[in-house]
Image: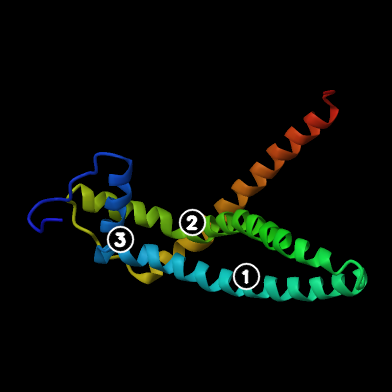
Amino acid sequence: MNNNSKPHLANGGAGYFIKGFELIRTPGIRRFVFIPLSVNLVLFSYAFYYMFLQLESYMLTLEDWLGDSFSWLSNFIWPLAVLFILVVFSFIFSSVANWLAAPFNGLLSEKVEALLTDQPLHEGSAFDVVKDIPRTLSREVSNWVIICHVQRGFFYFIGFYPL
């Protein structure tokens, strides 16, 4: 990125990806990416660690219940359980990560737009971010409630529709 000119826009899909990583290094934008990323990393590393500790205790209980004659079955169940946990964890992670990053997404888009249109980046205080957190999180919760109601209505309709 040249210091004298505004950053050029990318020409294609991979170019947008690379351009996004170039924009992350910009000092005014960096915190709006790394704060939610670090919070998610800490929360989910702890959750992942706890989940595998619980899986180990459940698998030991299952092995005791199966007995010696079916101990070979635990070699089959372990990978399936880990795969199942990874799939479910990825769905939960994406939902919670979006919910936790919601207060920062609006501010991030404002900063990126100001940078790309050569407008001056006004540095807001940390209080501005904290002030917006309850409003944006409550909006995300209301979006989740609406989605749950729509899905419930869809599954209610499908339940009565003969196949």
Q: CA distance from mark 3 to mark 2?
A: 17 Å
44 and 36: which one is in front?
44
Task: Specify the label residue 48 is tagged with.
Answer: 1
Specify the quadrant that holds the N terminus: bottom left
Label 1: how many residues lie within 10 Å, few (<14), some (14-19) or many (20+)? some
Q: Amino acid at mark 2?
A: Ala
Quarter residue 14 falls in: top left
Q: Position of residue 20 (x, y in %)?
A: 31, 53
Q: Is residue 73 left or right of residue 82?
A: right
Label 2: how many residues lie within 10 Å, few (<14), some (14-19) or many (20+)? many
Mark 1 vs 3, N-terminal side: 3
Mark 3 vs 2, N-terminal side: 3
Position of 68 relative to 116 (above/below): below
Mark 2 vs 1, N-terminal side: 1
Q: CA distance from mark 1 to mark 3?
A: 27 Å
Front label number (3 vs 2): 3
Quarter residue 99 falls in: bottom right
Q: Position of residue 73 (x, y in %)?
A: 83, 63
Q: Which residue is at 63% across, 71% downward?
A: 47
Q: Position of residue 6 (x, y in %)?
A: 14, 50
Label 3: how many residues lie within 10 Å, few (<14), some (14-19) or many (20+)? some
Q: Which residue is at 67% across, 58% downward?
A: 83
Front label number (1 vs 3): 1
Q: Is residue 139 left or right of residue 116?
A: right
Residue position for label 3: 24
Task: Specify the label residue 102 is tagged with.
Answer: 2
Outermost residue toward the left in this view: 4
Q: Is residue 74 left or right of residue 39?
A: right
